[in-house]
Amino acid sequence: MDNTLYVLCDVSGEQVAMEAAVPGSQLHPRVFAEIRNDFPQFQPGSYISLNRLLTYVNRAVDRVQLMPKGQLLSAPPDVDANLTLGQRLADRIADFGGSWTFILTFLGLMISWIGLNVWVFANRGFDPYPFILLNLVLSCLAALQAPVIMMSQNRQEERDRERARQDYEVNLKAESEIRLLQQKVDLLLQKTA
């Protein structure tokens, strides 16, 4: 007496043994979508035979392989595409303010300022010792430079968040491809067994 359970393959319309069929709920979303393209009535509770399933797994894998390398699940917006004049200026000022060029230039200007007032004008120049005007200039520079650097750091954080989102999408795509390949290997192993 044969105790084999049979189910209807909703793709071919044939009766197949339960162990030779897979329900739609266990399929990878890409494979399920491929089946739905040909059979819109296919549901998560529907069954497909292993023979027919292999065709759709191959199709889904082929579609993934045909995607351009590095293509993401959704097109990432360009963070720097619509910058305002103030944002572009803040980025440039922060880039210059955090460079050796700025440090050496500023050091040269301070030494020149002090040298002019102490040695050339014999401490009777436009800013004699204790250099009150120089202190005022340095304070103003620090007061203006801090918010500009903070604006630039905020922009950098936006870029970092966007890169993290893109990395996440790439990882999702890789995981999806691995699952498809695993499903294909499982089907091939079931066919040969």
Image (spheres, rainbow, N blue to C red):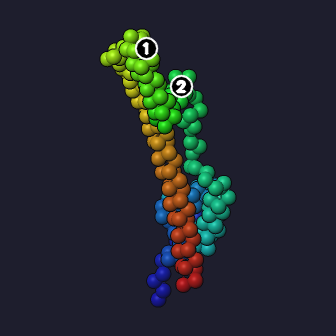
Q: Residue furthest left?
A: 130
Q: Which residue is mark 1?
A: 121
Query: Would you place residue 6 above or below residue 77 in this image?
Result: below
102 relative to 35, above or below: above
- In three-dimensional space, the C-alpha distance between marks 1 and 2, rounded to whole angstroms, equals 37 Å
Q: Residue at x 53, y 53 (%)?
A: 170
Quadrant of image for the C terminus: bottom right
Q: How many marks?
A: 2
Left or right of 58? Residue 160 is left
Q: Which residue is mark 2?
A: 89
Residue 150: horizontal and vertical position, in percent?
41, 30
- Given the image, on which type of amino acid does mark 1 rest? Phe
Residue at the farthest bottom position: 1
Q: Position of residue 1 (x, y in %)?
A: 47, 89
Q: Residues within 10 Å of mark 2 (few under 14, many from 20)?
A: some
What is the crowding at mark 1: few (fewer than 14 residues within 10 Å), some, or many (at least 20)? few
Q: Quadrant of residue 161?
A: top left
Q: Is residue 76 above or below residue 5?
A: above
Residue 107: x and y in percent read: 44, 30
